[in-house]
Image (spheres, grey):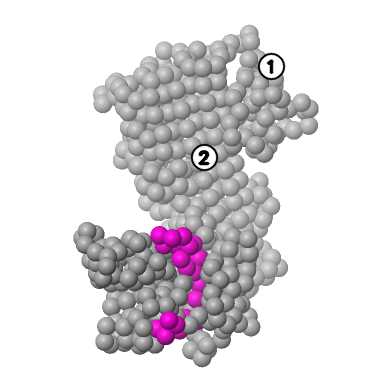
Amino acid sequence: MTISNCTFNTCNVNYRHALFWAKSGKMHFWNCAFIDCHAENLSGTKYFNYGLIHIEAASTLRNCLFLRCSAFGTYGSSSPSNHSSVVHINTGSKAIVENCTFVACTVGGGSEGGALSSHTRTGTAGTARNCLAYGCSNNFGPANLLGGLTYSHCASDIELAGDGNVVVNDANTTFQNPLGDHYVPMTGPAVGGGEILAWMTGSEDIRGFDRIIGSAPDIGCYEFREPTTYYVAVNGSDANSGLTKSEAKATLAAGYALLSGWDEKLVICDGTHELDISALTLVISNGWTLAGENGMDTTTIKLKKISRNSHKVLKLTDVFSEIRDITFDLNNVSFSDSPMADPKGRFTRCAFLNSNVTSSGGSDAFCRISGTSAPIFTDCVFRNAKIQHNGGSVFWLSETTSWPKIIGCSFIDCVAGTADTAARSTIFAYRGNCEIRNCLFLRNIVKGATDNSYGDAKRNHIVSSSTARTFKVENCSFIDCEIQRNPYAGALGIGAGGNIQAVNCFAYGTTNTTGTANLMTNVYSSGTITFSHCASDKLVPGENNVVLTDANFSYRSKRRGDYTVKCGPTIDAGTNLTWMTDAVDLMGRPRIIGKSVDIGCFELETSRATRFMVR
């Protein structure tokens, strides 16, 4: 039986069995991935599990991945302590294992087994060629490939006997995707360290790349290929190759179609490029990068005008993908759903302008983040976002078990709600973790609820949290924001059961229907909100908080859009946090100038050479 090009995810077996057992007939596994699969003896008896794959007949494994897999058994008098392995091969089976990768696998329950081994350790069970084991362990420490087979051109972080075997470790090897589901050696002795085998001619690795790139194959199931950069330019031609700026494609669709391999990049050259989302959603995956040529000030992607729709503008589907140095002008196109949902990658130095979400639902937003998605937004600008429906927000975090981060970002002139509908917040977390750091909220408006039915009126803050989990807000500034139709809310607060930790935050000029609102406190139902080293024009409870008045502080030049506090009680009044080492404020200046950090997102520099204007 041959099993090829299959993925087995979170498969589990119990009590002296294996996921696959080649007992009397041959089994062949080619280009298969086993991810988070486990063989465990949970019966409480002395019996063991052989492993995920147990081989007693002449079989082959080729180009297979075993990631975060385990084999656990209970040691007993009739069960040798080295029986269990992720792939277990009996003596005399003459199995052949070639170009397989074992990463972060575990063998336990009294076992001395490893990623790939035989319990007799006599070297007669079979042959392993070009295999890689990294970060595997058993009860006695690092396990790796271990013994019982003849090993040739294999890589492990324990030295193996045999021809061409090498040691890989953190010092000599860099992996392309060390936190995801790909472990591709980019540097080190595994790259080009394999043996050329007869079957490799015309064959591919587990991702579909040529099995041999260079003079010899890589060790393991992956072949490293240098990532390719492609180009799109307004003066290009879709007949061009796209491989250089002078040979750039003309349209985003043509450039995007070139992306295929891991870690590739599409450079968008200076100018304005039209995107028709009815024909193309930019799905950025496989570690791809979408980058502006010289920054978001010179590269713009502008949406083509279409009718109200539920299309997506962007999707980042893995944590290693990135979009950077681009302005996205959403051109006030009307969306009936979030145009950016559950991104998983990184957004760096991007601007998002003129978004318009008009859904009638209660949880939509410009960007909706849920579950394990943990995108990182760094140095981004969100301007003129309009969330025109009931209960929505510019950012909505729901059930986020990981930690999305919003760092050094500006939310300017964003409006949530309409004359007829009430919105939640600019950023709202429902049962969600989140970290917001060094951010500016300027002239944002939240059109709140007119009554307190279900507590909604007391959730309409600029930034708010509801129902457990942790929301960290550090060194953020809330300036001239407004909560309409709501006497309860303010710049920062919680709904039922929320949890916010506010440190070094600044609020001035933010109002609700009763007048000055500021940072506020816990005003609805259960939950916890703490303020430390915060400044506002109403004193909030907590340690080292200060009051601001027109008489005791001033901006450098509000008229010119410079909101750096040039004098007042916020200078050097914050508490220094661990992330501030080598960090910068919203203007790119050192985050700490003087003995302590300033409160808010701006740091007063000792010279006036640096300028940042908010218009």
Residue at far top of view: 551
What kind of residue is marked 1? Cys
The C terminus sits in image quarter: top right
Q: Which residues are magenta?
A: 122-144
In the image, is residue 18 above or below residue 469? below
**Is 402 on the left or on the right of 354, as rendered?**
left
Q: Position of residue 290 (x, y in %)?
A: 57, 57
Q: Secondary structure under badge 1?
A: strand
**Is 13 on the left or on the right of 315, as rendered?**
left
Q: Position of residue 598 (x, y in %)?
A: 64, 24
The N terminus sits in image quarter: bottom left
Residue 98 visible at all: no
Q: Residue at x 51, y 21 (%)?
A: 532
In the image, is residue 530 above or below residue 118? above
Q: Which residue is mark 1?
A: 567
**Is 446 on the left or on the right of 132, as rendered?**
left
Q: Nearer the viewer, residue 270 or 496?
A: 496
Question: Circles 1 and 2: CB distance less than 8 Å?
Answer: no
Q: Which residue is mark 2?
A: 406
Residue 138 painted magenta: yes
Residue 611 painted magenta: no
Residue at far bottom of view: 198
Residue 150 visible at all: yes
Q: Secondary structure under badge 2?
A: strand
In the image, is residue 403 above or below residue 560? below
Q: Position of residue 331 (x, y in %)?
A: 51, 46
Q: Nearer the viewer, residue 228 or 18?
A: 18
Q: Residue at x 56, y 25 (%)?
A: 504
**Is 434 on the left or on the right of 152, as rendered?**
left
Residue 508: quarter of image: top right
